[in-house]
Image (cartoon, rainbow, N blue to C red):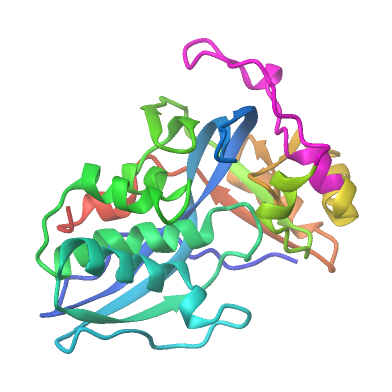
Amino acid sequence: MGNTLTTMRPPAAPAPGRLDGCPAPAKLNLFLHVTGQRPDGYHLLQSAFRLLDWGDTLDFAVRGDGCIHRSNDLPGVPEDADLAVRAAQCLQRTSGCALGVDITVHKHLPMGGGLGGGSSDAATTLMALDRLWGLDLGHERLRETGLALGADVPFFIYGRDAFVEGIGESLQPLELPPAWYVVVAPGAGVPTARIFASPELTRNTPPVRVHGFTLSRTRNDLQPVACALYPEVAEALSWLGQFAPARMTGSGACVFAAVDSAAHAERIVGQCPARWRAWRASSLARHPMHGSEMM
């Protein structure tokens, strides 16, 4: 079935001590190669990350008592495991800030979908609290803080399409033309750790160069593993592939295809099997938090 988009716009004009409607956009991995593995177990990656004009939104209200609290329930996500809460705790700890915050997470992105939802929520939390707590740390220090929370967090703070290497810390800007996408969630939640732990995962793909790489000569190394473990992913790829070349994003489970117009995307979304969810999404040139008074 189709779903209403939550488009990404800068947050509402801030009231004293609060920010509402802070956007946390989704991302696509246009490709994802595993080029090696470090002695500490972390995998070395190469990927082209693309922001989407669609995602979660978060509200923040400063507390003077130092407490960090999520104000709403999220099924399946305990407060102490929520990356937005953990991001606030990490920033409070590393900055020495005595203030706290109430966080409300309006969740629209599917969990375990490979769209970076939790990481994007964490990045938006860091950028919002940098402003609300009066820290003024800047992007570079926030990216360093974000990397401790997850490999995708620095990209969202970077805030534009990027060629990503290493464990997520090396980012180079990518100039990509605007595009429309169809994104399909086949209903499976794919744990990233399970995919990376698989002995079947390819871990020695030769590196590509940021200049001159073509999507036709790339792939998602995680896709075969996810398809073998979660047949729903393979089914969604097969269905979407009838309309345009389809690929899995991240560690799954969501799959996507680029199409030539919003109308074309809507037609495909309208044909999505009822057991799945599908969205039309457009590319996003810059993270909306960068376009506000936040940074």
Q: Main secondary structure of the magenta part?
A: loop
In the foreground, 71 or 58: 71
In the foreground, 283 or 106: 106
Seen at 66% across and 61% down, the residue is 112
Seen at 65% across and 37% down, the residue is 258
Left or right, 193 with respect to 138, comes to right
In the foreground, 251 or 18: 251
Q: Is residue 195 magenta?
A: no
Seen at 78% across and 44% down, the residue is 198
The residue positioned farthest toward the front in the image shown? 39
Left or right, 66 with respect to 195, comes to left
Compared with residue 244, is residue 35 higher up or lower down, i.e. above or below?
Answer: above
Q: Quadrant of the N terminus?
A: bottom right
Please provide the residue range marked out in magenta.
Answer: 199-227
Compared with residue 80, is residue 245 higher up or lower down, i.e. above or below?
Answer: above
Whether residue 106 is visible? yes
Residue 42, given in percent of the width and then of the height, sits at: 56, 40
Residue 29, given in percent of the width and then of the height, sits at: 59, 39
The residue positioned farthest toward the top in the image shown? 212
